[in-house]
Amino acid sequence: MNVLTNYPPTDELQALDSAHHMHPFSHNASLAEQRPRVITSAQGVWLKDSEGQEIIDGMAGLWCVNVGYGRAELAEAAARQMRELPFYNTFFKTTHVPAIMLAKKLAELAPGDLNTVFFANGGSDANDTNIRMVRTYWAEKGQPDRNVIISRWNAYHGSTMGGGSLGGMKGMHAQGGLPIPGIAFIDQPDWWSEGGDMSPEDFGLERARQLEEKIKEIGADKVAAFIAEPVQGAGGVIIPPETYWPEISRICKKYDILLIADEVICGFGRTGNWFGSQTMGIEPDIMTVAKGLSSGYIPIGGSIVSDRVANVLRDTEFNHGYTYSGHPVACAVALENLRLLEEDGIIDNVRNVTGPYLRKKWEALADHPLVGEAKIIGMMGSIALTPDKASRAAFAAEEGTIGFICRDRCFANNVIMRSVGDRMIISPPLVMTCDEIDILIERATKSLDEAYEKVKADGLMVSA
Ligand code: PMP
């Protein structure tokens, strides 16, 4: 019997899951009570669960299945590579074709002089690499004290000691001794929640200028780098005001601070261009990539590095690496995935057809009585739930209460949208068609309607 295709009934699976499987970012005891949904197969933008329910995936798995599910080409690329050369390392004077070809392809796709790749297994460990890389860069340049990395509150950069430290998630810092030393934080450019009476443009400038203040406070000769997502993802799809990134770029240049763009979500078409840096007009020194690089079919990540940084690192021995850095099977799958993104015109289609279509429908959700703002860029969007649009008020109930109510309605209506606090977010596969967008929006609207009824019935439509 093949245990993975010929599986026991759902309740048995759920019991086994709660007995033996500790889920990430979950309260496992309550999860066991609520019973996790068992996803068994998927095609295109549709998931199927063990009860035969069909669910439209508004999150592309975890922001990663950019080419959609069920692309046989990727399975074949993996099988071919496993037969040819399932593994070999790249540590000791050896290399292999998939790593070479993927690094070359990424150098072609990446903007500017980002021409060199250091491979990791995902986004978190790629950001760990970045910490060591920028500190080593400055040490090699004769400035070993230049080791502080500035990040932002409510950023997400992963779950390892390094990634979790770079991230600005206070709940994560509260567990396990984070952040590591040498990480500093500034506030995020979230105008809806934190902009007060300022215009979005003024607020964007104010938040960017916090970087300059922080650099002065620490001393420019102690700051190695600034790291940020072009558009914050896990923090709630926070699209910064237009004034933000130009000012950040100016400040990084002025103080010669390396700019790390964490493209783990924004990369590979999510914002309508290959990289979010292109959409936001950023010229990073390093880009973190993962997720959409392989469309999530296999774990792979990496740092794409500018000539400036690569040339310095080239002249030293960088004592860093993962067994699976440049894993041949992962590289082969990623290469095939990039071919699909390119040859099927998937990113062009997001930019010119499905992105604008989704934008119109998504922004119209701002008229819903539970919704304050609805913002979207490419295929990542968010709506802020509020008891009072005019004042952009938060709910009096504990943050996340209303988001959870809404997310549960989405779950019941077979649409995957995620809640972040009291925001609802989407990041669908980039192959979602206009007809499927209609279904997504219809189910999202139904879920919002039902959530609104419940929020009112529970007396929660109250401002903080
Ligand atoms: N950076 C960003 C911007 C992310 O969104 C994520 C994951 N959501 C990570 C890093 C961490 O990537 P991984 O989970 O692959 O380690």
Image: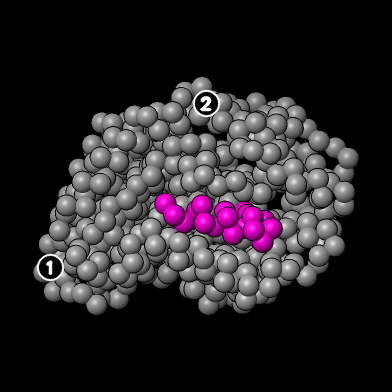
Upstream in sequence: badge 1 or badge 2: 2
**Rendered image coloring scheme:** one colour
Q: What segment is highlighted magenta in the picture?
A: 242-260
Observer-nearest of 330 and 228: 228
Q: Which residue is mark 1?
A: 456
Q: Is residue 370 above or below residue 119?
A: below
| Residue 398: x %, y % from top left | 30, 76
Q: Is residue 200 magenta?
A: no
Q: Which residue is mark 2?
A: 342
In the rendered structure, the answer to whether residue 464 lies left or right of residue 90 reads left
Q: Is residue 342 above or below residue 26?
A: above
Q: Secondary structure at mark 2?
A: helix
Q: Is residue 257 magenta?
A: yes
User: Which mark is nearer the camera, 1 or 2?
Assistant: 2
Whole-number angstrom distance, CA of label 1 to CA of label 2: 47 Å
Checking the image for residue 12, the label placed there is none
Q: Secondary structure at mark 1?
A: helix
